[in-house]
Amino acid sequence: MKTEVKKLSRGDIEVTIELTPAEYQPFLESAAQKISQNMTVKGFRPGKATYDLIEKHVGRQEVWQQALEPAVMRTLANALNEHKIQSVGQPNIEVIKLAPDNPVIYKATVAVLPDVMLGDLAKIKVDKKEIKADEAKLKQSLEYLQKMHSKETLVDRVAQKSDKVELDFDVFIDKVPIDNGAQKKFPLVLGEGNFIPGFEEQIVGLKSGDEKEFQLEFPKEYHQKLLAGKPADFKVKIHGVYQVELPEFNDQLAKSLGGFNSFKDLEDQLRKNLEAEAQTAENRRFEEELLEKIIAQSKFGDIPELLVDAEVKKMVDELKHSVSHQGIAFEEYLVHLKKTQEQLMLDFTPQAVKRVKSALVLRAVAQQDNISVTDQELEDEIQKNLVQYAGNSDAEKQLRKPDYKEYLRNVLASKKIIEHLKAKVVQ
C-alpha cells in the first residue's frame, strides 16, 4: 500500500492511498460473499457461491464497487495509524481510480487534532474569592417562606396594596388579542411587581365585580420580544379581593416547616444553602479564569473548521433550548435580533473557538500528566447512578449503553483534569 500525506490549510490533511489489485483482492472476496447472501445461485446455499459465479452474475465492476467502502475504512485507518495522525470527524473521500485489474487509488481529506504546546502551568495565578451568603437573597428566601404560609381572607372592600385579587384579563395590540393574552380568575398579589409597570396600580381601588379598561406600554426589555416597547389595551374584571396576613418570623414559623427547632435554625440552614450556591458559582468562575489563562499561555496548531463548526452548532442548539423555555419561537427571536441563523452562527464563532481551545488544553494536560479515568472509577460512578435510578428500568438500560459510558468517562475525566490543574496553579 502506497500512501502520500499532504498538509492543507485550516488543520486539514490530504491522504492519497494506492492499493495494488492483490491488496484489494481480500476486500473483493468479502464483497462477493456479502452479495451472494442476498441472491440465489442454483446449486449453492446463500453465501456459498464461488467468487467467479458471483462476478459473472452481477458483473466485475459491481463487485469492485461493493468492495470499496470496507477497503477505504480499513486502509485509511491503517494509514492514519502509520503516520500517527489523529483525525476528527468523518473524512471526505474522492475516488481517483477504480477499474478491475488496476490499482485502486483514492484521496481522503481529514481534519486533524492540532498540536498544543502548554505554557508553564506552575506560573499561572488565579485568585480565590471569599464565599459568603448573599444577605439580600437570604431575605428573599425568608419572605418567600413567609408568603407560602400566609393566610388569605375574602373581604368586601376595594383592593389595596398587599392584597391578593382574582381577576380576568384580556390583552390587545392594535385591537387584536395577543397569543396567551387572556386569563381567567388569575391570582395576583398587588405590590409584588409581577406584571408590567403600571398594571397593579390600575387594579388598586377596584372591588369584586368591577370592570376596567386601560392602556399601558410593554417595557422595551420585555422578555417576549414581539411585545417589547409596544402599547397594549387591557380589559380586566375583578372576581374577588383577599386580605393577605403574613406570619411573623419566629420559632413557630420555623417549626411549622418541619425539621427546625427555632427560627435561628431555619436561618442557618438557608444561609448554608446560599453559601453552597455561591461556592458553585465561584468554582465555575475560577475554572473559567483558569482555562482562559492556560489558553493565553499556550500555543495551538491550525484548528480544523470541523471542530469550530460543531461547537457553533452546539451553541445554537443550547440557545434554541433556552429560548423555547421562555415561550418564544426561535424564528421570532431571530426576527427580534434582526439576524439570520447564519449571521448568529458567525457571531458565535469567537466563543466557539475559545470552547474548542478549552477542550484541547484539557486533553493536552491529560496527556502530559498521564491523567485518565480507570474502568473501576467509571463503574463506581455508574453504580452511584444506578442507586439513584433504582427501579427505573429505562434509566438503568441507558446507563449501561456504550455511548453513555463514553460520555460519562469524558465528564469524569474533565473533572479530574480540572482538580489536577487547581492543585498546580498558584492561588
Image (tube, rainbow, N blue to C red):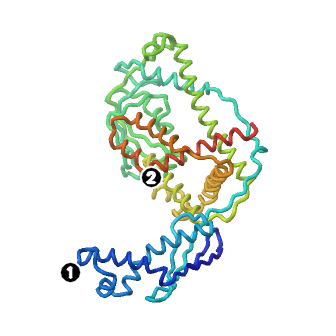
Q: Position of residue 96 (x, y in %)?
A: 52, 84
Identified by mark 2, the residue type is Asp
Residue at horizontal 23 percent and vertical 81 percent from the top: 41
x, y percent for residue 227: 47, 50
Residue 349 in sight in this render = yes
Image position, residue 223 (x, y; %): 50, 46
Q: Is residue 64 left or right of residue 115?
A: left
Query: Viewed as shown, does residue 205 lie left or right of 300?
Result: left
Q: Which mark is residue 403?
A: 2
- Can you tell which mark lies on residue 235? none
Is residue 227 visible in this depiction of the protein? no
Residue type marked 1: Gly
Q: Residues within 10 Å of mark 2 (few under 14, many from 20)?
A: few
**Label 1: which secondary element:** loop
| In front: label 1 or label 2 | 1
Q: Which residue is mark 1?
A: 43
Q: Quadrant of residue 189?
A: top left
Q: Residues within 10 Å of mark 1 (few under 14, many from 20)?
A: few
Q: Residue 159's x, y, as percent?
A: 41, 25
Answer with mark 1 or mark 2, whichever residue precedes in sequence.
1
